[in-house]
Amino acid sequence: MSSKVEEFGLFINGKWVTPPKAARFQTINPATKEPISSFVSATPADVTRAVDAAQLAFPAWRDTPAPMRGELLLSAARLLRERKSAVGQIVTQEMGKVIAEGLGDVQEAIDFIGYMAGEGRRLFGETVPSELRSKFCLTVRQAKGVVACITPWNFPTAIPNWKIAAALITGNTVVFKPASNTARCAAEVVKVYEAAGLPAGVLNFVTGSGGVVGKALVEDPRVRAVSFTGGVDAGRDVYVRGAHQLKMVHLELGGKNPVIIMDDANLPLALEGVLFGAFGTSGQRCTATSRLILHEKVYDEFLSMLTRRLKTFSVGDPLDPATGMGPVASEDQEKKILEYIAIGKKEAKLVCGGEKLTGGLYDRGYYIAPTIFETRHGTRISKEEIFGPVLSVIKVADYGDAVRVANDVDYGLSSAIYTRDVNRAFRAVEDLEAGITYVNAPTIGAEVQLPFGGIKNTGNGGREAGSAAIEEFTEVKTVFVDFSDKLQKAQIDSESAA
Ligand code: UN1
């Protein structure tokens, strides 16, 4: 990327526009603290203009045959594939995840857009028999209208597309508000849809704070649904504001995801899984492994394998393919994680890491050492979401104890168990309170063709991606067609065996 700080406007009604006298903010490379791009701090009036545009574009987009909408999505997927390497670099530079993961983020976006393109030729409804003669009953899926997609910084191209591609294929028009610190990644997503030839107003892009832009979006009565991924407090605020207007609010929030390692586990396999799950993306995934629940019979052995392995785990320049973990995403993130590490040092036993890294390239960015604490279940670090490279290790006596600890948190997104006992594995699938359970694999790595989401404080009951994506963005219309040429009364005329 050139050292020049590129300026972006808002994307409203098919045009990049910069409102007069707009205030601006910059995005920052967390590995170097250098500015990357500059964005508009939109005002509520800008948000209104974006919703106006989306509202105006809605009837024609809704009436465009879904397979044609799918063609446009397919073009967007192809374009993003062509730009994958460049956009992956931007993800790494703006968010700090290592380059393999930056490219993976973009690949997840490509995969999902392609998957949704195919949905243009499905969008299945139901056909159901009638209780009356000469009557046909079916359901169709209809667009909701203008929807808001509010997205986080940790998957800055994938998560926007989980929402945008699903909203578009189902005939909605979109106002997209990304996390401020990864607005450049978001702009690259918008540029792909623009280049694919999406009609003006179908996708609009507004940048700025949640408190101003997000709030204005959620409170605009013309926005019929809000899909939000982010923190619990912000999610609760969005939910409450949406509730006043009885609008559909979809929330994907935090996690405190456990990996259980049983005494019969393949330990070298589990080791690689724990490492990737806990320290991939510097632990900044909703699905990150933040609790390692270890059976007492393998406790000492596994912990020493883990600490030994960490000695060769490299933290550094995220653009270097040899690096295992890059910086954390921002100054705010660094501050919050270091606060949790300080709490951990008081209430638990530090095994390794536990500090801000300094010297050389570390002084230029927000680097924190991969950190492991041994703790009892119940401490703050064992129960609260940290969203950083901090792993709490908890010893348990048996499977029952492991499940009790795993479930005793306020979140329920992802979970995993390593065991060679097939009965135990299926038992865990039933017992673990989470939206996702992995067997012999880490808590991260969900695939787009399956529903994604969780229970408890992780959300409000919905799922996104997979088949759930269509439900998230559609209303069901139930249709009765009576071709009997007479008034037939359900429940009254119905022939009954009773
Ligand atoms: C998130 O952390 O919010 O399963 C999303 C995974 C990724 C998506 C994570 N495919 O880890």
Image (cartoon, helix red, strand yellow):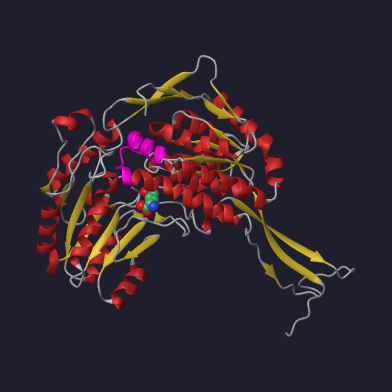
Q: Nearer the viewer, residue 22 or 485?
A: 22
Judged left or right of residue 277, residue 25 is right
* Image position of 188 with respect to 408: above or below: above
Q: Position of residue 153 (x, y in %)?
A: 38, 39
**Which residue appears farthest toward the front when viewing the image?**
82
Q: Position of residue 322 (x, y in %)?
A: 23, 45
Task: Tell me if residue 401 can be seen.
Answer: yes
Q: Position of residue 79 (x, y in %)?
A: 51, 42
At x 30% / y 76%, what residue is drawn?
Answer: 422
Q: Magenta stretch containing residue 468, yes or no?
A: no
Task: Tell me if residue 250 can be seen.
Answer: no
At x 48% / y 58%, what residue is drawn?
Answer: 449
At x 69% / y 34%, what residue is drawn?
Answer: 56
Q: Position of residue 93 (x, y in %)?
A: 33, 34
Q: Magenta stretch containing residue 95, yes or no?
A: yes
**Which residue appears farthest toward the bottom when viewing the image?**
497
Q: Can you tell which quarter of the image residue 135 is in?
A: bottom right
* Magenta span: chief secondary structure: helix
Q: Which residues are magenta?
A: 85-100
**Which residue appears farthest toward the top when viewing the image?**
21
**Which residue appears farthest toward the right when viewing the image?**
485
Q: Nearer the viewer, residue 146 or 31?
A: 31
